Image (cartoon, rainbow, N blue to C red):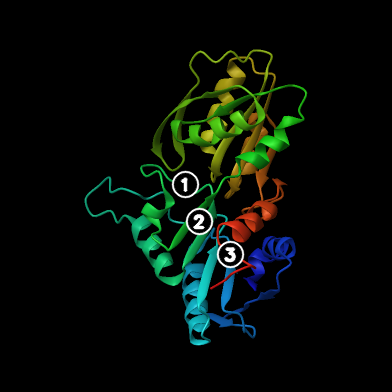
Amino acid sequence: MILGFPDSRLQAMAVAEALDARYDEVGMHRFPDGESKVTLPEVSDEHVVVFRSLPNPNDKLVELLLVTRALRNQRVKRVSLVAPYLCYMRQDSAFRPGEIISQKIIGGFLAELFEDVVTVDPHLHRISRLEEAVPARNSIVVPAAPLFARYLSDRSDKPLLVGPDAESEQWVSAVAKECGLPFAIAVKQRFGDRAVSVETPDFQVRGRSVVLIDDVASTGTTLVEAVAKLRAQGVEKVGVLVTHPLFVDDAVDKLLQSGVSEIGSSDSILHATNVVFLAPLLAETLRNALDYGRNSS
């Protein structure tokens, strides 16, 4: 079965439909003191796939703990997690004395709960493989690049794809390779969560269309800075495509006010900007990489 939560219902049901699998849902109630009351449906399967994207993760992680422990008590042999957006991946190193490397702690926590962890384009900086952060039996990354490339391939203006910083090159280059478009990478300096500097050296963009591509957009600060530099260099039109649309506070408004003409995202997180839908890729991964639906032992 695919076991979903109210906040990820649409994505989980789409994956269940693609797999022709049974869907059921965890019941959720929040007590006045903030505690979660979690209710499981009847489970008779030996393999359960828990589907939940993990923005705003702190309550969700506790609820995943409650759900997995209850599933084990019902003698479920294998529990897999599909988390299109995977939390706590950015803090992978200590930059000041006393800073906790949360990536390893949360990654280890998830590996203790689940045999398999499937996610989309995790925000990895100083490591190259998900299993270094999440040492589960199977730690699987599903790339969104093929879907973004398909989305872009029909455009007649043949835009230049631009990554706003060095970390984005892995995603931008993959999309560019899939759809045959040129790409370039900007240079970023970060001074804080909402303070960055972006440089676009030698970009030939005057009169061109550009699409900025990144894995995560939260405050939108980096993208807004990149748009400002591109517009100063004479770009005709700027669009934005992101895998994980966190878009906190007024991030979308800031992007639109900066001159962005279109904003698109995957449905790793439900958002009004969703234009790319992950269910087919996630279902294919469950079917092939985890042999879900054929041999779930």
Residue 218 in percent (x, y) is at 54, 46
Who comes first in sequence, dot 3 or dot 2? 3
The kind of residue on which mark 1 rests is His
Residue shown at the point (69%, 19%) measured from the top left: 236
Q: Dot 3, how many residues are within 10 Å of its Cα: few (below 14), some (14-19), or many (20+)?
A: many
Residue 26 in percent (x, y) is at 62, 77
Mark 2 lies on a secondary structure that is loop
Residue 35 in percent (x, y) is at 50, 79
The residue tagged 2 is: 86
Q: Judge whether 10 appears above or below 29 on screen.
A: above
211 horizontally vs 171: left or right: right
Mark 1 lies on a secondary structure that is loop
Q: Dot 1, how many residues are within 10 Å of its Cα: few (below 14), some (14-19), or many (20+)?
A: many
Who comes first in sequence, dot 1 or dot 3? 3
The kind of residue on which mark 2 rests is Leu
Mark 3 lies on a secondary structure that is loop
Q: Nearer the viewer, residue 223 or 185?
A: 185
The kind of residue on which mark 3 rests is Arg
The residue tagged 3 is: 52
Residue 6 in percent (x, y) is at 66, 70
* Quadrant in the picture for residue 155: top right
Could you say which disc has been placed on residue 123 in the image?
1
28 horizontally vs 130: left or right: right
Kindly indicate whether the residue at mark 2 contacts the one at mark 3 (C-beta within 8 angstroms).
no
Who comes first in sequence, dot 1 or dot 2? 2
Could you say which disc has been placed on residue 91 in the image?
none
Residue shown at the point (50%, 77%) measured from the top left: 68
Taking the view exactly as shown, the residue that stands out farthest to the front is: 295
Residue 69 appears in view:
yes
